[in-house]
Image (cartoon, rainbow, N blue to C red):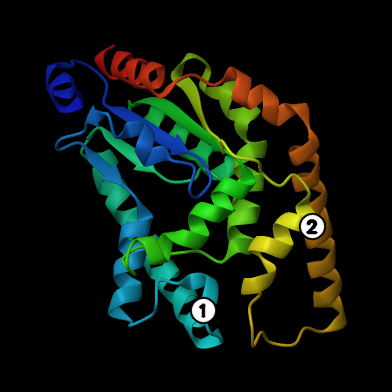
């Protein structure tokens, strides 16, 4: 088994940062599972967020959240984000090597972080894990129950928008990270839905938020415009050869692990 900790102890020079990118349920942890991470820090805002939700006695089944729970979720996420930023600042100031376990859904924020890390003397690598939209939604839907209530299931509409953003970011990330980029594809082996309407009927409609505040006409128009834009982008990705290109350009889990080892040991 590859020991990243031993490699890090022996490595001389710049600290290393590995940014994980992938939609919820993509299987980023699965790709890293064969690596002995030992004491290597894995930074994940979800750990803080989940603890705060538990402290506030809010169910982690966020796909069925009440209006009151959604309000508490927003407060908990704001507090978690503030704490996480402080933790990240301490890690970077201490020049500690780490893995950032997130979605990298925000291209702007991820590229800004990459620049900040490089300015601080880091070498930065991205592991991108692609998965089908339906697999992402299915994994999210089952996560709360399969974990016996210890892990959270997001609102499926958030999963949909995150999958869209992460998938669109593939080519920009591949270009910017260059040789320090590798992708793995975790796709459904059984038949999957390709029509967005059918996907939404199966995974989003049953969990449509209840008790939302009424919107004025301008807010309704903005919401409708945003939804139409998202639906158009997702439909294009579901039908586009661009997704096929992502899958065809991806490597096996073992090849990705070897590339990560080479990066850290370089």
| Residue in the picture at 71% in, 55% down | 199
Q: CA distance from mark 1 to mark 2?
A: 23 Å
Q: Which disc number belongs to residue 65?
A: 1
Q: Secondary structure at mark 2?
A: helix
Q: Nearer the viewer, residue 76 or 238?
A: 238
**Residue that appears at 51% across and 42% down:** 104
Residue nearest the observer in this picture, 44 or 144: 144
* Residue 76 placement: quadrant: bottom left
- Would you say 202 lies left or right of 21 here? right
Instruction: Farthest residue to the front: give it.
Output: 190
Q: Is residue 220 above or below residue 162?
A: below
The quarter of the image holding the N terminus is: top left
Coordinates of residue 195 in the picture (x, y in percent): 78, 49
- Label 2 packing within 10 angstroms: few (<14), some (14-19), many (20+): few
Q: Say whether residue 177 is left or right of residue 246.
A: left
77 in relation to 128, above or below: below
Q: At 44% from the left edge and 68% from the top edge, which residue is drawn?
A: 78
Q: Are marks 1 and 2 in contact (CB under 8 Å)?
A: no
- From what the image shows, is residue 91 above or below residue 120? below
What residue sits right under mark 2 in the picture? Answer: 197
Front one among 92 and 178: 178
Q: Quadrant of the C terminus?
A: top left
């Amino acid at each position: 088994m590859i020991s990243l900790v031993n490699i890090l102890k022996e490595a001389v020079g710049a600290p290393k940062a590995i940014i994980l990118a992938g939609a919820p349920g993509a299987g980023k942890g699965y790709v890293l599972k064969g690596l002995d991470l030992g004491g290597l820090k894995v930074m994940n805002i979800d750990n803080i967020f989940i603890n705060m939700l538990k402290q506030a006695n809010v169910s982690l089944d966020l796909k069925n959240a009440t209006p009151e729970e959604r309000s508490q979720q927003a407060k908990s996420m704001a507090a978690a984000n503030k704490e996480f930023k402080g933790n990240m600042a301490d890690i970077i100031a201490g020049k500690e090597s780490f893995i950032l376990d997130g979605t990298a859904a925000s291209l702007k924020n991820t590229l800004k972080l990459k620049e900040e890390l490089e300015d601080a003397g880091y070498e930065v690598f991205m592991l991108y894990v692609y998965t089908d939209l339906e697999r992402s939604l299915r994994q999210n839907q089952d996560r709360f129950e399969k974990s016996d209530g210890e892990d959270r299931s997001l609102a499926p509409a958030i999963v949909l928008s995150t999958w869209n953003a992460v998938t669109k970011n593939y080519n920009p990330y591949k270009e910017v990270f260059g040789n320090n980029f590798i992708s793995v594809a975790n796709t459904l082996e059984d038949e999957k839905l390709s029509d967005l309407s059918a996907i939404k009927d199966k995974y989003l409609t049953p969990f449509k938020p209840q008790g939302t505040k009424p919107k004025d006409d301008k807010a309704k128009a903005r919401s409708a415009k945003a939804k139409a834009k998202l639906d158009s982008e997702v439909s294009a990705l579901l039908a586009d050869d661009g997704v096929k290109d992502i899958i065809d350009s991806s490597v096996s889990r073992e090849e990705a692990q070897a590339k990560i080892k080479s990066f850290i040991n370089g």
